[in-house]
Image (cartoon, coloured by chain):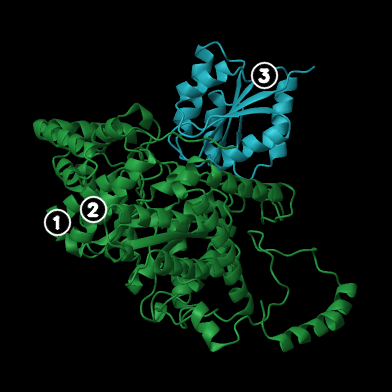
Amino acid sequence: MVKKIRILIAKPGLDGHDRGAKYIARALKDAGYEVIYTGIRQTPEAISRTAIQEDVDFVGLSLLSGAHRELFPRVVQLLRSANADDIVVFGGGVIPESDIPYLKENGLAAIFTPGTAISEIITFLENTSAKGQA
Amino acid sequence: MPVNAELEQLKQAWEQGLLKKTLVRNPESKPEFTTGSWLPIERVALPSLTTTAEYCEKLGFPGEYPFTRGVQPTMYRGRLWTMRQYAGFGTAEESNTRYKYLLKQGQTGLSIAFDLPTQIGYDSDDPHSTGEVGKVGVAIDTLHDMEILFDGIPLDKVSTSMTINAPAAILLAMYLAVAEKQGIPRAQLNGTIQNDILKEYVARGTYIFPPKPSLRLITNIFEYCTREVPKWNTISISGYHIREAGATAVQEIAFTLCDGIEYVKTALAAGMDVDQFADRLSFFFNAHNDLLEEIAKFRAARRIWAKIMKTKFQAKNPKSMMLRFHTQTAGSTLTAQQSDNNIVRVTLQTLAAVLGGTQSLHTNSRDEALGLPTEESVRVALRTQQIVAFESGVTNSVDPLAGSYIIEELTDRIETEAWQYIDRIEELGGMVNAIEQGYVQKEIQDAAYRYQQEIENQTRVIVGVNRFMVEEELPQDILRVDPHLQEVQITKLHQVKEQRDNLAVKTCLEAIRRAARQSETNLMPFLISAVRAYASLGEICGVLREEFGEYRESIVL
């Protein structure tokens, strides 16, 4: 049997807007993935620890407060320094278009902004998995 | 329900005749029509009020119980609503400049946005604050920042609303200290603190302490302000964020009024008389897209609250029964795609708020799905209010849609459904228990999920997102907060800490600790002494965290 893709949906920083994160978590679960949701106000350290302990394939970060430039790359760095760079990190939230190249240079595999259809995220997960990147 | 049997018969005849023929030739576009929150809505509504007694019971006159038609006898003929744009970012200096700009543009009240570390009681140099300093609002560490924030703004001339919850008592203490320095008596201060912790647990997330000590802080504020700051609105019981989290219109008002019930109960349990504090309670609602449903929602909320205060809590003063509210247009309806369309959405939402009888209003800017709004887009948002106020004519008559068959029917329906939730939550042992059991969160999340699924499967049309799309370049020129701001703010904080009397600070913090341990003691005077001595927000909250503990979210998916 093929191993189910495991995804951690996480809310780094102090932002409490969790409608998007919870929607994505539930929609991915309904689509057949194994999904863990951290709850709000997690430090990057706690997120990378959970990702490793739970042996996930993907970490999806959601942030609407504007602290993504600091906090998203930090999660990637922590995973790398724990030799867990096989875990693919993607992000979403209110992210200005002009920040996306910076985040991708710093290890984010994809950024999904408001209005993204869930099918687009699923396509990303499947393509990345098929390429053996996760 | 229409009670006029004759009219009902005529309607049936019409349905069997002309309507039937029409539907055969031209079927309607969908089998069922509902409001944005899935309330069934009639094709053609009929009058529901037939007698004078019924009119008086359900609507009454403006300024009179049950306040369905508004809390003031003249409403906007007397005075327009307060135009109050929520703003704040970066340092106190930058925000001060924005406030002065807004006042110059004709805004009539200030609304302070604090950054997340301030809202959660962390100083700018706390590790938890990394990346968040000055982002969603202004960073306040000590009284020094607050002095800069209001520099050149006479506090007896403006009314100030502060979106601050868990540490509301401390920020209020700082505001009082600034007023003191400006030489303004507390009794002249006008304003509001949000101070609504219950909705933080379910929808907004900036909680610090568990419910019990949080409710104590809120009651301490009620008691203190009743004596010392009588014109202050001590709480803004907020449905806004509950709606933003995905709740329906009915859930928004039902859960908010349940929060209100909990605060009233807590204050009564602390020995206060209901008419001592209830007239200072204020509310905060969301104006969403469905114009008819939203207007009905505001009217229903006023009627329910009046009944709760009169019958459940035996208030005697009519002012204790008035639901006065601030409104903000729904941020979650803004789209990143074709963002100028948001101006139109905000206009409709403004109309809903005004036709629903709001006391003050914030209109969102078109670019807020992209980032912080620019000065230009904030001006357009304010102009939207001014156009509705001065050009549309809707302000000329009080509660102008009263008597519209569908508005009255929706008002009744929303009231009925809201009571069902209110009763259910009472059965669960009140709002604190309902939250701890995850009931409220689950109800909201189910509605949010359904809403989003409808967007995904295109049964709910969002113009520019799932229909009428275009290829477009997303704008690059958005307002950015200086990335060095955290360092600047930390330097400022450290300077204050060097210059203040650290022994005095220590004494004040210990006094707060002792007062916190005595549950009968009002903390406000101790907090005021500490902020005057330039104790930082993080230091004060640190002591309270040690004494009160911290709330942990119960995750419901």
Q: Left or right of B185: which side holds B377?
A: right
In the figure, the green chain has which letter?
B
Amino acid of disc 2: Phe
Rendering quarter of residue B297: bottom right
In the figure, the cyan chain has which letter?
A
Name the residue beneath numbered marker 2.
Answer: B150
Name the residue beneath numbered marker 3.
Answer: A134
Amino acid of disc 3: Ala
Name the residue beneath numbered marker 1.
Answer: B182
Do callouts 1 and 2 point to residues on the same chain?
yes
Please tell me whether mark 3 sits on a helix, a strand or a loop.
loop
Q: Residue at x 27, y 58 (%)?
A: B272
Point out residue B451 in the picture as x, y percentages from the top left corner: 65, 51
Decide: few, some or many residues near mark 3? Use Cα within 10 Å; few <14, some 14-19, many ≥20.
some
Q: Are marks 1 and 2 in contact (CB under 8 Å)?
A: yes
Q: In the rendered view of the protein, which quadrant contains the N terminus of chain B?
A: bottom right
Q: Nearer the viewer, residue A124 or B405?
A: B405
Q: In the rendered view of the protein, which quadrant contains the C terminus of chain B?
A: top right
Spatial CA distance of label 3 from label 2 is 52 Å
Q: Do the residues labelled 3 and 2 touch (CB within 8 Å)?
A: no
Spatial CA distance of label 1 from label 2 is 10 Å
